[in-house]
Image: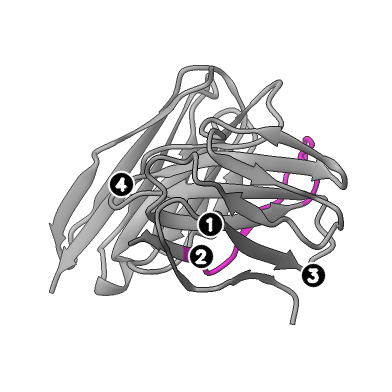
Amino acid sequence: DGGITQSPKYLFRKEGQNVTLSCEQNLNHDAMYWYRQDPGQGLRLIYYSQIVNDFQKGDIAEGYSVSREKKESFPLTVTSAQKNPTAFYLCASSSFPQEGDTEAFFGQGTRLTVV
Amino acid sequence: GQQVMQIPQYQHVQEGEDFTTYCNSSTTLSNIQWYKQRPGGHPVFLIQLVKSGEVKKQKRLTFQFGEAKKNSSLHITATQTTDVGTYFCAGRGRTGLNFVFGPGTRLSVLP
């Protein structure tokens, strides 16, 4: 089945550690996105990538890093520089944005907790 | 930059009552999408509107895109408990490469 997979579902991190969240899609989508969602809040864009080996900062990129070495994969690293990393992280993919946009498909999310 | 707002933030209704959420953008949009997120789940695409004044229906859900392409609404007729969740609009500006999400409207339906 085609879809977008995030792992792990739950992640606990000690303060000062870097952690990497996985996002894989087999939908052949060019664009991939990372969002952060805090309790009762909307989605804030962290990073997005329109094509392999290229990515752009979103609204809240500080303390995060990404890579896009393969079309299927867009991992997100939450670094120790991120002051308040506890949140629900959502990865999404879509066809390349153009006039006839198609929907964004979201993964199941990773719930990150700093302990 | 582009900002997308939604009202109300929360809405509690009795099952069978109607519900409407409104979405407003600070800039003219190329198109707008609506998503639903069930509690504990991830956003799921509902619909996309592209044309000025466009109205689309999905069973009890009616979506509208304003004439100026700066606002949109989602109306649910005769709500059911299965409608519970948060409804997000997401707008893309004429020059933007990605969608900007509104903060969402959380709907509770009392049986």
Closest to the camera, between mark 3 and mark 2, is 2
x and y percentages locating residue B3 in the rendered image:
46, 24
Tags 1 and 2 on a common chain: yes
- Report whether residue B12 is seen: yes
Q: Are marks 3 and 2 on the same chain?
A: yes
Q: Nearer the viewer, mark 2 or mark 4?
A: 2
Q: CA distance from mark 3 to mark 2?
A: 16 Å
Secondary structure of residue under mark 1:
strand
Same chain under badges 1 and 4? The reply is no
Residue placed most toward the observer, B83 or A105: A105
- Residue B96: x and y in percent read 68, 26
* Residue of label 1: A90
Provide the secondary structure element on which disc 4 rests: strand
Q: Nearer the viewer, residue A113 or A89?
A: A113
Q: Amino acid at mark 1?
A: Leu
Q: Is residue B34 left or right of residue B20?
A: right
Q: Is residue A105 magenta?
A: yes
Per the image, the residue denoted by label 2 is A109
Name the amino acid type tagged 3. Asn
